Amino acid sequence: MESKSFEKIFSSVTFKDKSHRLVNLICEHIEGTISGKEDKVLSWNPPDNELQFWKDFLENGNEADFFKEILKRTTHTHNPKYVGHQVGVTAPITLLSGMLSNLLNNGMAVYEMGMSSNAIERIVADKICETVGYDSKSGGFLTSGGTLANLTALLSARKAKVEHDVWNEGHTKPLGIMVCEEAHYCVDRAAKIMGLGEKGIIKVPANKNFGMDVNKMEEYYRTSVSQGIQVFAIVGSAPSTATGAYDDLEAIQAFAQKYDLWFHVDGAHGGAAIFSEKYKHLLKGAEKSDSMVIDGHKMMLMPTITTALVFRNRIHANHTFSLDADYLLNETQEDEWYNSGRRTFECTKTMMCMHWYLLLKLYGEAVFDTYVTRQYDLAKDFAEMLLKEPDFEIATYPMSNILCFRYVNPNLSLKDLNELNAMVRQELLEEGDFYMVQTTIRGVHYLRTSLMNPFATVEHLKVLTNKIRSASEKLLQEIKQ
Ligand SMILES: Cc1ncc(COP(=O)(O)O)c(C=O)c1O
C-alpha cells in the first residue's frame, strides 16, 4: 500500500460524503421503525446463510451497500415490537457522542489522554452516587459493561474484607460470595475468575417470586462457614435477569452488616430505577450498599457499552488494583480521580461518559424517571391483560419491565407445553414481526419479554398475544392431524 493511500483513507471530503449518506439512512431507519412503517423487527436468516452472505460480500459486494445491508440484517431495537433482550433503545443524540469518541480515541486511562472525559466522568459518577443516596465520601467510575463492573466490585470487596493480601500473595484459605440462585450468571463467572471455585459461589435459593429467599441466608452462610469458607460478600440483584425480580435489598444489607460482609448491588438492569419517583422504593437498602452497578446501555437509553460502578466509600475504588495492601489505614492517600485507569479493569476505554452527560444536559434526570416509570408501568399493564386471558399464564407479577409468560392448555402435559411455547417462539422469530426471547425457570418454558422500547404500547402487546394464541392453536391442529 502506498503512503498516498492514507490521504484517501483520511480524506475529510470522502468522510463527509459517506457520513451524510449514513446519517440519512439512520434517520430513515429511526422514522421507519418507530412509526411502524418498517414492519419487521428482524429478517431472519439461518447462521450459515448469513456467514455465506458476508463471505460473498467481502469479495463481490458493493461497498456503498454495506451500511444498508447491516441495517437489513440486524434486530431493530427502535421498532416498538422489539420486546426481546435487555438492550437499550438508544436516544439518537448518543450516536453523536459515540462518533466523537471513536474519532478522538482518547483512552482515558491517564488524564492527558482524556482531560474532558475524566472530568465529565467524575461529574456523572458523583451524580449517580448522590441519586443512590451515598454521602460525600462516595465515588465511582464508568467501565465496559455490567459483567466487568460486577467482577471489579467483587475484587474490591475481597481487598476490603479479606485480611490476607490475596492480590499479591494468592489464596491461602477458601473464600466465598453469597448470591441468589436467580442472579445473572456473570456473578458466578466473577467468582470463578477470582479462583473461588464452585464452593465459593454460595447460591441462596429464590422464593416463589424469584427474589432471594432472605430467610435462607443464615442457613447458607452457616453451612459455608462450617466448611471453613470465609464468606466476604453478598450480592443483591436489582433485579435478576430472567424474571426481573428485585431482591429484598434492605434485608440483605442488614444481614451483610451483621456478619461484616461487603454488600454489592447488581443493578445492571434496574439500578436506573433510582431515578424513578414511582419505583425507587425497589432499591431501598441500596443507599447502604458498599458498591452498586448500573448499566447505561440497558434502562438508560444509551449505546453499548457503558456501566457505572459506584462505591459508598470511594477509597475502595481507588485501591482495588493497587499493590498496596494496607490502604485502609491510609485514607489520606491522594485520590487522583482524573487518572481513571487507576480504578478500572480495562486500560483503554471509550469516552462513554459523554452519553450520560449529554442526556443529563439535554433532557435532565427527568428523562430517566419518565422512561423507567413508563416501561415498568407497561409491564404491569401487560400482566393485567394476560391475567384476564384463560389460555395464558404469567411466571410472576412483574416488578420491573421484564415479564415471563406462556401459552397454556389444560389438555397438554408440561413437556408438551414447553415444546409448544418453544416452537411458537421460533416461529415468531423466523416471521420477524415481533422479537421476543425465552427462558426456562424451574422446568417451565416461558416466553420472555423485556419492554425496552419507549414507543411500545399495550396495543402492540395485544397483537403479540393474539399472534402467540393463533400460532399455538395452528401448531396444535397440525400436530393433531
Ligand atoms: C442483572 C444483570 N447483571 C449483569 C448483567 C451483565 O451486564 P452486561 O451485559 O452489561 O455485561 C446483566 C445482563 O443482562 C444483568 O441482567
Image (cartoon, rainbow, N blue to C red):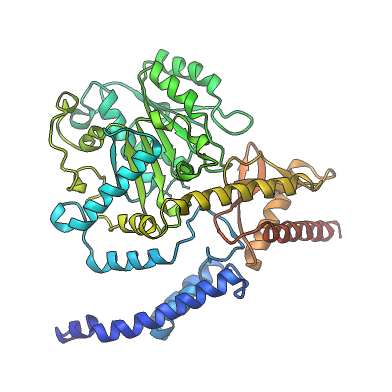
Quarter occupied by residue 33? bottom right
Tell me which corner region of the image, top left, top right, bottom left or bottom right, holds residue 292: top left
- Name the residue at 63% across, 36% down: 442
Q: Is residue 440 above or below residue 468?
A: above
Visible residue check, residue 194: no
User: In the figure, 5 relative to 274: above or below?
Assistant: below
Who's the residue at 31% across and 54% down the image?
353
Q: Position of residue 381 (x, y in %)?
A: 68, 48
Left or right? Give the position of 442 relative to 475: left
Q: Position of residue 344 (x, y in %)?
A: 25, 45
Task: Provide residue 22's location: percent of width, then percent of height.
Answer: 40, 79
Toward the viewer: 378 or 396? 378
In the image, taking residue 324 as reference, residue 316 lies left or right, namely right
Q: Position of residue 58 (x, y in %)?
A: 39, 79
Quarter of the figure that contains the C terminus = bottom right
Above or below for 179 versus 59: above
Question: Which residue is situated farthest in the top direction here?
Answer: 226
Name the one closer to the observer, 409 or 170: 409
User: Is 143 rendered above or below residue 39?
Assistant: above
Q: Is residue 350 visible?
A: yes
**Residue that appears at 42% across and 58% down:** 363
What residue is at 50 percent from the left and 31 percent from the top?
180
**Quarter of image, res 66:** bottom left
What is the count of numbered marks? 0
Quadrant for the N terminus in the image: bottom left
